[in-house]
């Protein structure tokens, strides 16, 4: 069975396989770690890339007569690796372990192979209009059209990106420097890491002056945390999936991506709705800012202060609030 990639928004009524995302009414097989997926039990794994590899390696897999199409409803590193494994299994299997690390770096911000992390950084750079080699015009269209271009261009280039990542320094170096600086700060003890496994909380405390020099920054960080450190360096060192980052009196708590998906290698604590905590914090807050929680359904849920650089609440009192809320019933009173 030779599969070909078809953009999700161009799928018609032809039977298809969907990897990493969610299917449509014509989907015959789903290979995804998304919540509510219909992935067959024998293929389930933490990453969609691992699921796709389990499928292509299964010599006894059921025949899907008439299915020639594979797709995904979004673009990211895990999705790209998953589609690549399906459309070119021979090449993908030859670098299976490396590609899984690329997917892990992209989805989980964890990686123990530096070149795999760099490949992930290159792929991420392609999605940034300020750094992508794609024409800026491409970014003026719809998300579906952009996803189509990213898949069509990177599926054929992925083996070369893996093989020649050292030559693509302009795309991975900015993020790699942040990763290196964060790793060095952890080793030097500048970043303090404490874990409370009973409530699955890692507390990451930065020095008042921060850890990044002015020339070691990301141009378009996805969050305040990403402007202060690299999550890969932190996630590589912790076992907890609720993470609180502190710098002076600025705080941000997030639930890691793994707690959103169908994670199977270990049982994770459920997300706790922090809406009531937000009310209590806003009653106490005197900085002029407002606390917000993005909700348990967001891919990465965040509790953060908006409208002020720092909170009026002391670190010790804020941590007491967090610990008290994370001890409550999952998805109950936060």
Image (cartoon, helix red, strand yellow):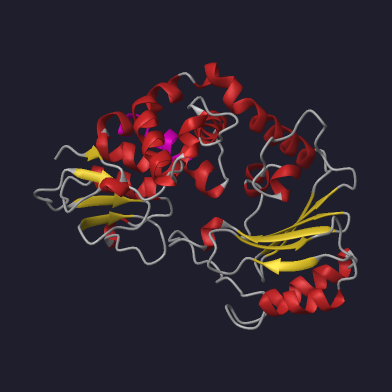
Query: On screen, 262 above or below 180?
Result: below
Quadrant in the rendering for residue 255: bottom right
Q: Which residue is at the front of the view, 181 or 237?
A: 181
Instruction: Write down the region rendered in magenta.
Output: 93-101
Prevailing secondary structure of the magenta residues: helix
Q: Position of residue 49 (x, y in %)?
A: 38, 45
Residue 31 as seen in the image, left or right of residue 117: left
Residue 261 belongs to magenta span: no
Residue at the spot 62% in from the left edge and 56% down from the top edge: 239
Residue at the spot 60% in from the left edge and 69% down from the top edge: 295
Residue 284 as seen in the image, left or right of residue 244: right
Q: Position of residue 152 (x, y in %)?
A: 34, 32
Query: On screen, 9 above or below 331?
Result: above
Residue 98 belongs to magenta span: yes
Quadrant in the rendering for residue 270: bottom right
Q: Position of residue 8 (x, y in %)?
A: 31, 48
Q: Quadrant of the N terminus?
A: top left
Quadrant in the rendering for residue 117: top right
Query: On screen, 294 above or below 212?
Result: below
């Amino acid at each position: 069975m030779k599969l070909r990639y078809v953009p999700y928004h161009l799928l018609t009524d032809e039977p298809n396989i969907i990897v990493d995302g969610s299917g449509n009414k014509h989907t015959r097989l789903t290979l995804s770690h998304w919540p509510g997926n219909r992935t067959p039990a024998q293929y389930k794994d933490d990453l969609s890339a691992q699921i796709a590899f389990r499928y292509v390696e299964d010599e006894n897999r059921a025949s899907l007569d008439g299915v020639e199409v594979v797709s995904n409803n979004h673009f990211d590193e895990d999705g790209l690796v998953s589609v690549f494994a399906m459309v070119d299994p021979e090449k993908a299997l030859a670098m299976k372990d490396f590609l899984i690390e690329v997917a892990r770096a992209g989805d989980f911000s964890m990686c123990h192979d530096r070149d795999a992390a760099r490949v992930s950084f290159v792929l991420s750079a392609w999605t940034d209009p300020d750094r992508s080699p794609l024409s800026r015009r491409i970014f003026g269209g719809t998300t579906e059209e952009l996803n189509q271009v990213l898949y069509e261009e990177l599926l054929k280039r992925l083996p070369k990106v893996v093989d020649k990542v050292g030559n693509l320094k302009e795309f991975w170096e900015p993020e790699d420097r942040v990763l290196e600086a964060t790793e060095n700060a952890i080793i030097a003890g500048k970043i303090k890491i404490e874990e409370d496994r009973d409530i699955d909380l890692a507390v990451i405390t930065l020095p008042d002056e921060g850890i990044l020099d002015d020339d070691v920054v990301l141009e378009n960080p996805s969050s305040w945390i990403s402007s202060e450190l690299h999550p890969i360096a932190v996630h590589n060192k912790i076992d907890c999936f609720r993470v609180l980052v502190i710098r002076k009196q600025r705080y941000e708590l997030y639930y890691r991506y793994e707690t959103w998906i169908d994670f199977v290698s270990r049982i994770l604590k459920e997300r706790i709705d922090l809406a009531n905590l937000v009310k209590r914090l806003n009653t106490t807050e005197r900085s002029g800012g407002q606390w917000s929680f993005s909700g348990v359904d967001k891919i990465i849920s965040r509790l953060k202060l908006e409208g002020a650089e720092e909170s009026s609440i002391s670190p010790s009192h804020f941590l007491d609030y967090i610990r008290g809320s994370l001890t409550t019933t999952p998805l109950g009173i936060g």
